[in-house]
Amino acid sequence: MTWALDHLDQILTRAVQHAWLAGLPLVIGLVVALPLGWFAVRRPRLRAVVLTTTGLLYTIPSLALFILLPSILGTKILDPVNVVVAMSIYTVALLTRTVADGLSSIDPFTRQAAVAMGYGSFARFRAVDLPLAVPVIAAGLRVAAVSNVSIVSVASLIGISQLGYFLTDGYARSFPTEVWVGIVACLLLALVFDVVIQLVSRVLTPWTRAVPA
């Protein structure tokens, strides 16, 4: 505990870096996964192809992806952009199926009612389908957030500054306290992401809190 308090500034700095590297890909991944999931629902014959292809992206080893991306993107090995791109790929892999499942879970009668009210395809997706799919998508985002926080720590092996530094540095120095600080900090950061996603989901779905008369 004393070591953590003595290094609190360093812990907070790396926590912010870690949050950025794990959080930005959540937004990018969601933006990409939404049209892919929508397309999978709109084209049932291609659904399996889209979901399988995106799902396979998650099987790429993270360390290998961190090392390969610089040669693909033309960036330097220590450029945080490599981590953001890699984590965005993993987020798309996790969320595309979630988006498709969320959109597929909507009551067909609700869709028919929206069509009867004059909603076009895109307007219905924006105003009806997407809001109703928020709880399912939020659940997938919570899983992706925890996954991102965990995987980002691997980037410390190639020198990217974030909370994973305490894991590798503590191990190299045979200093368990530092390792535990890194583990606890990652857990707390994942918890923060989880709480924020739940709060945003509640704000976007006020009807789920309605009290029956």
Image (tube, rainbow, N blue to C red):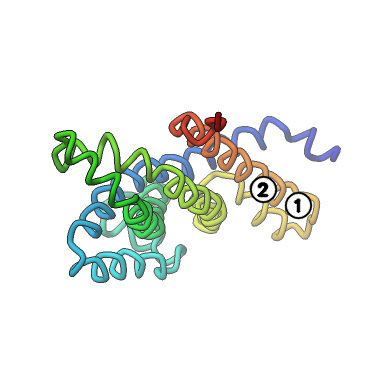
Q: Name the residue located 45 percent from the left edge and 63 percent from the top edge.
A: 62
Q: Is residue 1 above or below residue 54?
A: above
Give the residue type at disc 1. Answer: Trp
Q: Percent position (x, y) of residue 24?
A: 41, 40
198 and 160: which is toward the camera: 198
146 and 110: which is toward the camera: 110
Q: Dot 2: what SS? A: helix
Question: Would you name the residue on which mark 2 appears?
Answer: 187
Question: Would you name the residue on which mark 1 appears?
Answer: 180
The answer to whether residue 80 shows anywhere in this view is: no
Q: Name the residue located 67 percent from the left edge and 42 percent from the top edge.
A: 188
Q: Percent position (x, y) of residue 17?
A: 53, 38
Single out the mark in the foreground, 2 or 1.
2
Which quadrant does the C terminus fall into?
A: top right
Q: Is residue 153 above or below residue 23?
A: below
Q: Name the residue located 30 percent from the left edge and 65 percent from the top edge.
A: 51
Give the residue type at disc 2. Answer: Leu
Quadrant in the rendering for residue 1: top right
Marks 2,1: beta carbons within 8 A: no
